[in-house]
Image (cartoon, rainbow, N blue to C red):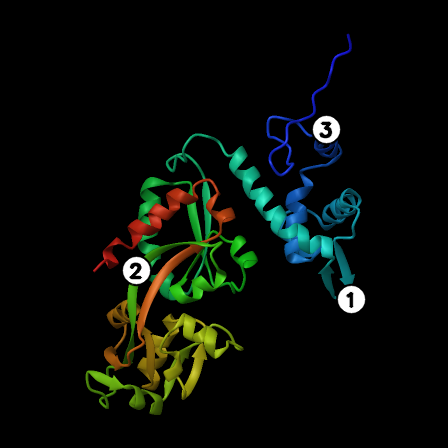
Amino acid sequence: MPRTIKPAMRGPRGERDHRGSDPLLIRRLRRANLDLLPILHELLQTRSVTATARTLGITQPAVSKALRQLRQLFEDDLLISLGRHAQLTQRGETLLPSLTNVLLELGLLLEPSQTFEPGSERLHIVIATADYVSVLLAPQMARLCGGEAPGCDFLFVDRPVRSVEDLDGIDFLIAPRPFGRTFGKRVEQMPLWRDEMVCIASGRDGRWGDTVSAEAFRAARQVVYQVGERTSLERAALVQPTSTLEVSPVCGVPNFLVIGAIVEEAECLALVPRKLAQELTRSRDLRILEIDYPERRLDIDAFWTPRAGAKRGHAWFRSVLARSTERFAA
């Protein structure tokens, strides 16, 4: 009597039941080289063979060969060169978000089941933030990591982060809460500390009392923190709520630490977070003035994508961040 082969079970919408196997998928996986998927993901993000080779630490010819294989596999060009620039095909655009999720799920699937052991494992963490944050956090973080995780190192970078794709390339972004929330609900966050903006003046500058009004600040010469030459007013306000007061700058600088030196020597005013101002007054002849302005609160949070959060050791390092800010609780 001939054997009857039962069809794979399907759910209410016709999807194949997970208890069944898909012969077509099995055949596709057999002819696909899954090692090419991380290369494809990087190519779709960077749109550059050179940048992909540099990021992944492989040669450009190897990336070019992988791209040829991927084009055959997907029966699509995926990436089209247009002079010095390149653009994704419609298929390439469609693949990117799905591929990000697939690689995240594969990472979770292949991750060792045992918990991360900071005392014996290696871990490299990249944090994009301003020098204000690194001045406050780095000493405590170095102390904790040095005592608990000799194989752990962390790198602070001042790198533009404008999209979720940029955020995927680092482990953490530490930034003011309104700015971090522009990345949407796909990004996870952890509150770190609350601060507020204050004004600093040279200790030799006797023109000011303990408080400076918004009008007096606008009329004075100012040194301003500027995250980019073409920063929009909206983005500047997300990074620093008092930025609308900075209308008469003498100069703009991309980091906070140099602001103290300029204010001390040139007798200008500047707006900086209070916790940084307190650090600056320890080494320079500066005074802290209260700024009479309602919008000066600053909530600093850590942000990361699910892809970064799935990295082995990421959860442990989040505890390091939390413990490094405990002294700020008030």
Residue contact at pointers 1 and 3, CB within 8 angstroms: no
Going by the numbered disc 2, the residue's amino acid type is Trp
Name the residue beneath numbered marker 3. Answer: 23
Going by the numbered disc 3, the residue's amino acid type is Pro
Question: Residue 163 versus residue 140: which sits nearer the camera?
Answer: 163
Q: Secondary structure at mark 2?
A: strand
Residue 182 x, y percent position in the rendering: 47, 64
Q: Pick the quarter of the image with the N terminus.
A: top right
Disc nearer the start of the sequence (1/3): 3
Q: Name the quadrant containing residue 13.
A: top right
Classify residue 6 as left or right of residue 133.
right
Q: Secondary structure at mark 3?
A: helix
Single out the residue that lies furthest toward the front: 12
Disc nearer the start of the sequence (2/3): 3
Tell me: residue 71, above or below residue 84.
Answer: above
Name the residue beneath numbered marker 2. Answer: 193
Q: Pick the quarter of the image with the C terminus.
A: bottom left
Residue contact at pointers 2 and 3, CB within 8 angstroms: no
Q: Nearer the viewer, mark 1 or mark 2?
A: 2
Disc nearer the start of the sequence (1/2): 1
Question: Residue 141 versus residue 179: which sits nearer the camera?
Answer: 179
